[in-house]
Amino acid sequence: MKKTDKAMFFLEQKDMPTKWYNVLPDLPKPLPTVLHPATGKPVTPDDLKKLFPMALIMQEFSPERYIEIPEEVQTAYRLWRPTTLHRAFHLEKALDTPAKIYYKYEGTSPAGSHKPNTAVAQAYYNKLEGIKRISTETGAGQWGSSLAFAGALFGIEIKVYMVSVSYRQKPYRRSMMEAWGAKCVPSPSPDTKVGRDMLAKDPNYSGSLGFAISEAVEDAASREDTHYSLGSVLNHVLMHQTIIGEEARLQMEMAGCYPDIIVGCVGGGSNFAGMFLPFIRDKFSGKKKDLRIIAVEPESCPSLTKGAFAYDFGDVAGLTPLLKMYTLGHDFTPPPVHAGGLRYHGMAPIISHLHNLGLVEARAVPQIATFQAGIQFARTEGILSAPETMHAIRVTIDEALKCRESGEAKTILLAHSGHGHVDMAAYDAYFSGKLEDYAYPEEKVKEALTRLPKVAV
Amino acid sequence: MKKTDKAMFFLEQKDMPTKWYNVLPDLPKPLPTVLHPATGKPVTPDDLKKLFPMALIMQEFSPERYIEIPEEVQTAYRLWRPTTLHRAFHLEKALDTPAKIYYKYEGTSPAGSHKPNTAVAQAYYNKLEGIKRISTETGAGQWGSSLAFAGALFGIEIKVYMVSVSYRQKPYRRSMMEAWGAKCVPSPSPDTKVGRDMLAKDPNYSGSLGFAISEAVEDAASREDTHYSLGSVLNHVLMHQTIIGEEARLQMEMAGCYPDIIVGCVGGGSNFAGMFLPFIRDKFSGKKKDLRIIAVEPESCPSLTKGAFAYDFGDVAGLTPLLKMYTLGHDFTPPPVHAGGLRYHGMAPIISHLHNLGLVEARAVPQIATFQAGIQFARTEGILSAPETMHAIRVTIDEALKCRESGEAKTILLAHSGHGHVDMAAYDAYFSGKLEDYAYPEEKVKEALTRLPKVAV
């Protein structure tokens, strides 16, 4: 490698994008309506104001293509943004591929992932409305710790309902939340009615993200001073993440490249949408018709590749609005893969819609193969990746190897969502041979899908 | 804060310094000679070649002011360098201080600290000499994981002797080493004679950094294919770290500032020396006479503030050359503070020499106060710092508060050595009230100092 071949692309702070990109007005077909869980009618902004500040509700349905990032949020972003775009020279060499691999690395944020991009925005808008306290849920802890960090910056009390099994398995994520001043309890908890009912029914219930959402929503709905916050899935959350892709566009220009393939992992979908939405508009417009966008999910929790495209709840108890999305059923509990951030029954409506329109591809990969890819990445590019990110790395490597076969020098852009320094137990499991591949739980999903809400749309 | 007040200073890769700074020719008085442990005579390069590649031995004694960073090392650096210089606006505001606080953050490296700066250089020079295997020791694991990463990049087998108590307490650092392909054993281990002897004498001995060094040195000395590597203390190690300060000089110029005070934590001293050496030459030359340089150490392991300035071994078994340094005695075992990287009996000869000449100040701080500072930093600047780094943050905050009293707008430059994402157990201990302040173990030190080697210099 020559010195002149740049391996990193920095954006100056003055060049950091100051607007989020809202894909809604550019969608080739409009997004299906969101429905009220009780009435089955379209939700109104008023229905949501118990849970969210009006600014976020307006963003959720906004017809504006660009939304100005408030000064205070930009200031918070500047604690770690713009993030760096890397060229994966070492990995390319190890793969002996003509492909050019770039990755945008979000692991340098305070919480170690992309999650703070929306956490600081949500905390800011809540503060602006005079909200003193926010409730939320977290699985592996990435989201809870990111909102805890944002709460510290804006002086808002944060209450996190953490999926019980993760609360016990990942005490260090909990410590991170406490370090930033948040309160974190295992879910099910005695702090909510749904939690108490569940504990009475099954004291050993190990929790799920969908259940923790039910608790957090109940908490917010029952207190005047409290709002609720979600770390993925919703339109406004995906929009806040577009800072990733907006930066990446400028950095790819600096590199003199445009991606042929964009790859990312999807749980609720916010990290990957944040990367690809600012590029997919070129596909809509026909300017980059051949751009391929590949969403990668676990084989054991394959909402996009095996789920139904239907209206469903975001949570187990059925408290959230109904979203049209790829779903495995709202009370489906995914197997305990280490990529906790990918263990969610549904998929962001925007990604679901784009997949349904044939504009976003989906691929499901088994757990062990993702760790093999993650280790290869660590030993070449140096970064110990989060288990979630390893899913995207697996497919990036697979595509680069296809280029070796075909001789094509494709440009692959990888959305690298975060580091794995708090996930070393998962690495341990891999090295000690204890890591399993979970088969797709077809029967459980089939059963869960029988409980989809009936909707007359 | 206005948009135009920059919070981060990026260096372009093309502007990354391509030379390390070697302070030896600029020292106001020459460094005391290194002595052979058996003969007490000055060591020759030949004495060291069983342990180190000749390139590093030459660097250890080099009279050249600048040493070119090899192309391959620069390429490795570019996986994460240049690192960012931050202005701590949020912390300044919380402290209500007129002081301007800047911090250079090394936590974005693959291992999460400054250690890879020298690890990749050492691995490279060993590879150049055809060495296939390197042995080393590690305390908390920062160094072992960094050398493991470097070994992965250059295809060298790494064997790490990890202090037994840390091996058990910090399994995740061990997993990081394994992720990068290194072999890690608890020290004392049955793999060396000193290890076997110790296990026979005291099967429950919990180890110390000095003892692990003895094992790693014996390992390297007894095998043809193996060299030894040290992560701090030695001149060439400090020199590799000057990439930090060389970058910081350029970035402080971008900020239009020159530091009045530079603060860093010291264990062996390499991180802090890497930061301040490129600045202290201005103090030597009289250009910046008033520059203050403050080295911060734990109150319970206070080599600079309480140790003897004397010749001593770097390890417990007395296998290393004799170095003139501030020492608490080579067989002194420090209390189990969480800042494992600062639990070393000695101090880099260069820092010891400069402290002795009155050019570097030293301050010792108690553990709990460092965590209080670290939490304040986390809740303002967002970064969860390593317990080692919190020592430097403590004194940075103290100096900024003095500025509030005096009204002086001093510029403080903090050497931020790394993140604490793998140290959350320490945060836990703090929040649960289990963290202790250890008194300075005066009697134990007094006793250990009676066993200093007799040297006729």
Image (cartoon, coloured by chain):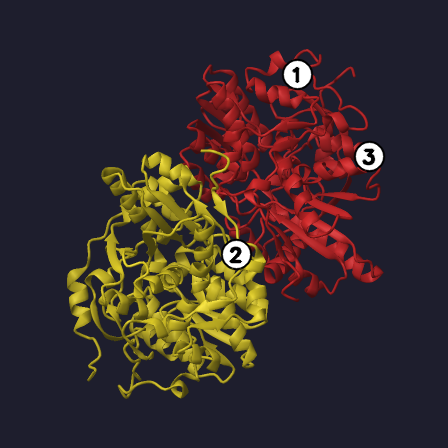
Chain colours: A yellow, B red
Q: Which residue is mark 2?
A: A82
Q: Which of pointers 1 and 3 lies earlier in the amino acid sequence? A: 1
Residue B456, by quadrant, is: top right
Residue count near mark 1 (Cα–Cα under 10 Å), binned few <14, some 14–19, many ≥20: some
Q: Where is A283 relative to B323, above or below?
A: below
Is residue B284 in sight in this rendering? yes
Q: What's the residue type where badge 3 is placed?
A: Ser
Left/right placement of residue B375 relative to residue A421 reads right
Q: Where is A85 relative to B236, above or below?
A: below
Q: Which mark is residue B275?
A: none
Q: Quadrant of the N terminus of chain A?
A: top left
> Between residues A156 and A48, which one lies in front from this camera angle?
A48
Chain under numbered label 1:
B
Q: Which residue is mark 1?
A: B37
Residue B261 screen position, x and y as percent = 76, 47
Residue count near mark 3 (Cα–Cα under 10 Å), binned few <14, some 14–19, many ≥20: few
Counting the numbered discs, the total is 3
Left/right placement of residue B451 relative to residue A109 reads right
Q: In what element is the residue under mark 3?
A: loop
Q: What's the residue type where badge 1 is placed?
A: Pro
Q: Residue at x 67, y 33 (%)?
A: B345
Q: What's the residue type where badge 2 is placed?
A: Pro
Q: Quadrant of the C terminus of chain A?
A: bottom left
Give the farthest residue toward the front. A287
